[in-house]
Amino acid sequence: MALVTIGEAEFAALRDLIRERFGIQYDDSKRFLLQSRLQTRLVKCRVETFADYHRYLLTSPDREREWDELASVLSNNETYFFREPAQLEVLANDVLDESLRVNGRLRVWSAACSTGEEPLSIAIRLLETKRVSPTSVTIKASDISPRALAKCAEGFYQELSFRATPPEILQRYFRPFRNGFFIDDEVKRMVEYFRLNLLDAAAVRAVGPMDAIFCRNVLIYFDKPTQKRVVESFADALRPGGYLFLGHAESIMRLTDRYRPVVTPRAIYYRLDPDGTR
């Protein structure tokens, strides 16, 4: 396939369209990354240039189907089981204790679940406490990528996904098959998967009320206004005093005053103000 070069005007037009639709920010330093990711879409859509592709996204009768494909192409699905385990410990101790006391159950949302390793890690860690059953926990998991959600439905994972998984956990909750493992059916049934765009504030709000939301290593792909928009939508989906877990490199300290940070020696996370208001 011959390489098609993206011009400045084409890059700016596509960058703005993608940011409006998905919130993903491609600054000038990522121009050629975007070019690389979109090369195959030009072929699939049978267009010659990036300007043609921009028009396709705006006017083609098949544009919604192409936006679905683009959501998968642009998603970063780098993830693995038991990533940032200190946050899972906070969930399995502090959050679980409080939620069982207040609600009699725990409600958790993995808000950018990729191929499913995060919500399944949450389910397994909670089962390992021996204090909850699948019926006393609600775990919801969403992503914008149809391809990632298809992997979640399949429930099959290969070696790279297990680089932080203790051997005893692998043996207890996974079934070997050829060059990988299937997740245990009971654990798989604990997670409800669905597609959601985090820019859709009404859809985000409708997921709640949640005791905890995990949205790790996602905000780094958004610009500041979009970050603010998303975390304030999360506030509307959390119960008063609910918990928000972000990636270790992400901070919302200067974005909103609706949360307060909780800093421990091993983990940093955020709590919604108890009254739940701005």
Image (cartoon, rainbow, N blue to C red):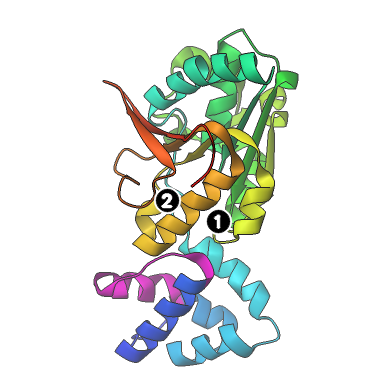
Q: Circle 1 sits in a helix, a strand or a loop, which is it?
A: loop
Look at the image and give the residue range highlighted in magenta. 21-39
* Residue 273 in sight in this render: yes
From the image, tell me which residue sits under label 2.
218
Residue visible at 38% across and 58% down in the picture:
221
Magenta highlight on residue 154: no
Residue 35 magenta-drawn? Answer: yes
Judged left or right of residue 234, residue 193 is: right
Q: Amino acid at mark 2?
A: Val
Q: Residue at x 61, y 47 (%)?
A: 142
Q: Is residue 141 left or right of residue 185?
A: left
Q: Position of residue 277 (x, y in %)?
A: 53, 43
Judge whether 149 appears above or below 36 on screen: above
Residue indicated by mark 1 = 198
Question: Looking at this rendering, what residue extends furthest in the right direction?
Answer: 135
Can I make out residue 223 in this image?
no
Q: Secondary structure at mark 2?
A: loop
- Sequence-first tag of 1 and 2: 1
- Residue 146 in percent (x, y) is at 63, 57
Crowd band around label 2 with a 10 angstrom C-alpha radius: few (<14), some (14–19), many (20+) = some
Amino acid at the residue labelled 1: Leu
Q: Which residue occupies the foreground of this view, 103 or 24?
A: 103
The relative height of residue 61 versus residue 24 in the rendered view (above or below) is below
Q: Position of residue 2 (x, y in %)?
A: 39, 84
Give the quadrant of residue 115. top right
Give x and y (percent) for residue 72. 54, 61
For the residues labelled 1 and 2, say whether their Cβ atoms are less than 8 Å apart.
yes
Q: CA distance from mark 1 to mark 2?
A: 10 Å
